[in-house]
Image (cartoon, grey):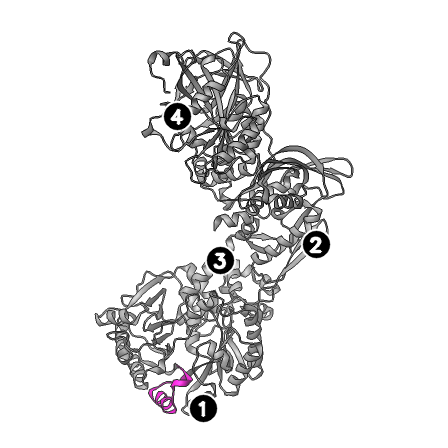
Amino acid sequence: MPIPTPALSARIQPNSTAPELIRNFCIIAHIDHGKSTLADRMLGITGVVEARQARAQYLDRMDIERERGITIKSQAVRMPWAVTDDDGVMQPYALNMIDTPGHVDFSYEVSRSLAACEGAVLLVDAAQGIEAQTLANLYLAMANDLEIIPVLNKIDLPAAQPEKYAEELANLVGIDPSEVLQVSGKTGAGVPELLDRIVELVPPPEGDPNAPSRAMIFDSVYDVYRGVITYVRVKDGHISARERLVMMSTKKEHELLEIGVISPEPAPTKGIGVGEVGYLITGVKDVRQSKVGDTVTNAAKPATTALAGYSEPKPMVFSGLYPIDGSDYPALREALDKLKLSDASLNYEPETSVALGFGFRVGFLGLLHLEIIRERLEREFDLDIISTAPNVIYDVIQEDGTEVLVTNPAEFPAGKIKEVREPVVKATVLTPAEFVGTVMGICTDRRGALLGMDYLSEDRVEIRYTLPLAEIVFDFFDTLKSKTRGYASLDYEPAGQQTANLVKVDILLQGEKVDAFSAITHNDKAYDYGVTMVKRLRKLIPRQQFEVPIQAAIGSRIIARENVAAMRKDVLAKCYGGDISRKRKLLEKQKEGKKRMKMIGTVEVPKEAFIEALSTDADKKKKK
Amino acid sequence: MTAAPFSVSSSLRSSTPSAGSANHEHARVGSRSFSVYCHVPFCAVRCGYCDFTTYTNAELGPGASRATYADTAIQEIHQAQRVTGERSVSTVFFGGGTPTLLPVTDLARMLNAINSTWPLEPNAEVTTEANPDSVTQQDLHHLADAGFTRISLGMQSAVPHVLTTLDRTHNPARLPDVVSHAQRAGLQVSVDLIYGTPGESLEDWRTSVEAALNLGVDHISAYALTVEPHTPMGRRIARGLIAAPNEDDQAAKYELADDLFTQVGLTWYEISNWARGGISGPHACRHNLAYWRNQDWWGIGPGAHSHLDNERFWNVKHPRPYAEALRHGRLPMDGRETLTAEDRELEAVMLGIRLSCGLPIVELSAAAQRAIPTLIAQELIDPRAAIKDQRLILTRQGRLLADTVTRTLVG
């Protein structure tokens, strides 16, 4: 229940709460399974947010997050809660709810969030059951020895099947189905019981209050006004306002300008102690100076060993981003520079394309990350962006033994190649049993190797495959979703490299290579890619005064060809009743159109043709 | 290099931007001739491809009906004179619509009104368009008596299924009689053809061209069918009921027609027009040349366009507001534009290159002149004319790609 008296409240004030009164937990859930709604409900029930000021989904700050119903960046909120103990005495507790990103692209951030907790609420939609990503995060939480509290959400829905999915969860976690809590974030049903359960089951944090301070950064957010806001969980010792801090990975010292807790707005405190979760402001302007996973310690009395688990974010997927209007290039650079302040995993460097002009080769954690960045560029910075087909990093070993790291098909070496290595992932697909064949078909088609499969329940199957990452970044997810009527879910994690028979397919317009369309594909699929692109381009390239051959080639070998026949007629027959103005305006419009043409050799190609040819089928569906 | 009396050079020289307005006494432009276009917005049947201002109902409201149309148009002629001041008329063209849906007496009254407002020059060319179905032998004599010198017959095709697709109702068998009656009445005769109609084969087209040539006319216009999306034919194409005209097919038909016309001595003098004796011969349509040479003209009637000095302006499209404005003593003008030097340059090129006499290269901008070798290399302009006569004249391929050439020259 909400804390009834000031005396009880006083025992859980920040900076002076005994670790045994602290509970740190997170919520593991799939997109749309109602995590944010439940979190908002908890904020309301614990009195942290007055009902009337509760903005829908309080924790999701960014517009995109709210629209997509997903959480990109985690945050932490401190909530007071009182529970009567076995002796009938009411005890106050400080619950820190640490919000975690829900998507596979951000699994590193998820792992750091989990590392800041002792317990996890496993939240599953009672009408849908568990999804692959949730399962992956559950395994991650179990590997971190977190106390798991399985909960079915949305039990108010008519389509809810709580018995069925309670059994599934119980099997996964190894408990009795009757122990699975049933809640509704929407109505609030079961939420107080859930809070009680958290206090009861989640172990209090442990740490040495007298040791040199160590706090783990589990999130780092850029704020326009305050600079970087760093979220930490104190493991040992105590962090006090105004002390000097050291980031253990960079050895950089920072003045602590402000320390506090969020409840739900930031509230400065004199410090935070063992087991507490709070935020730090040091005045740095770039999240790279305050990295997720890093350990913060006191500069004057530093700890000797950092907390385990820190690693640099590694881009997995690359794409060229180009402004549709070439004059927007400086604006794109500025926008990326700004996004980089809040996104430590964003990497980019300038690149030029004959077809698309000046742009950037950008590294992403995954496809969703790419989509989010592209959308933020378009929405927050009002830029029109074209992105090239996403690709992965290839390790190309040439005949002479030199190794080339290829992040852009254009860099693929032209000479003799001994070996090409591509990244592979271990993919987990959860699907209703009826789609097992379909899913296996999709995976086989994409060069997958079956690792194994398990029935989670009567009709739900977990299928594990090794798949080339390149196959996943293309349209795997869309295909999987459409062929399983949206039921299958996917998770994957990096699993090293494999050697594969990969080739680079170039597209040539009248013998000129069009860099934006080059792709690295498996030898078996090179022909398909070539034919598809060549056919697509034939429809998009306007007729010129001469015949334009469009070819697909591997090295000097042509594998597909189409022709755009020479234009034979470009003249208006008649001026309607002396309407010269109309004809002149038509020509002026055509002149304007010509300005937006790109020259590939002597061939004029409208910018729209590149955009159209590069947009995947999935993009087109979205536009409809 | 000699300039024809109406050469583009004269219009370029007078292309200084003018603050002049079409609403007050117009500044005299000595070098320009003056023409009158008279639009008759009525048709017996609306053709599916037609994008012109025309109506099939005889009664469109006060002053806008077929019966009162001539009087309304005459009011505009009187109003227009206050703007143009005194001009003499070198050509008059009645177009439509179907001018011959009006009684010949009405056409004669309109022509008289023009003549008494702006005197016709002694050798003035006076043309009317006519539907072969709605013109009698008697009409033709009356037209000649009234001062008409030329008739342009909407033949379009000699092939029944093509005429059907075009919604044309006339019987092609009537044409030889109409032509010979017209010629006997002393009228010059031209026929209009349309090529590239959905369903028209190359052989169909050859049939039509040969039929037109058998008529023994001295002037033929052949236009590629252009389908505007908002016409009934445009909608039928959009719905997939008939195929859209194919540009390759139209190009092939243009070439075939050009070959056949040339063989019998009809020379191209404008992209879509062929005449015995070519551009400076007695059969070229001087009214059309006035458009391409940027002369002055006044367009009478709903939706008609006018050009005076640096102004282009046009009338409201619907006959009712058109008549309404005139009844209140106002010109029925719907819009206007004052041409900038840039507009002038583009127009001079886009109009001038359509003619067989082409453009003097020296009149082109430096950038345009630099493009000449490219155009020669692409076989779009005649190398001999360019080098020897310093004129830019389109080759046949260039005629088919005239808009490409214009964009190259005025980039």
Chain identifier of the residue bearing label 4 in the image:
A
Where is mark 3, residue-wise? A591
Chain of the residue under label 3: A
Which residue in the structure is indicated by mark 1? Answer: B177
- The amino acid sitting under disc 4 is Leu
User: Badge 2 local density, few (<14 within 10 Å), some, or many (20+)?
Assistant: some
Q: Is residue B136 magenta?
A: yes
Mark 2 vs mark 3, CA separation in Å: 36 Å
Residues in magenta? B129-150
Q: CA distance from mark 4 to mark 3?
A: 60 Å
Question: CA gap, disc 3 to disc 1?
Answer: 47 Å
* Residue assigned mark 4: A43
Badge 4 marks a residue whose secondary structure is helix
**Residue that appears at 51% across and 82% down:** B159
Q: Is residue A310 above or below residue B388?
A: above
Along the viewing direction, whichever of A272 and A436 lies nearer the viewer: A436
Q: Nearer the viewer, mark 4 or mark 3?
A: 4
Callouts 3 and 1 close, C-beta under 8 Å = no
The percent coordinates of residue A207 (x first, y second) are 53, 12
Question: Disc 2 or 4, which lies upstream in sequence?
Answer: 4
Q: At 58% across and 82% down in the image, what residue appears?
A: B263
- Which secondary structure, mark 2? strand
Q: Nearer the viewer, residue A185 or B185?
A: A185
Between circles 2 and 4, the one closer to the viewer is 4
Classed neighbour count for the residue bearing mark 1: other residues with Cα under 10 Å, few (<14), some (14–19), many (≥20): some
Q: Residue furthest left?
A: B328
Identify the residue under disc 2: A559
- Vertical placement of B185 versus A436: above or below? below
**In this view of the protein, can residue A459 be seen by the observer?**
yes
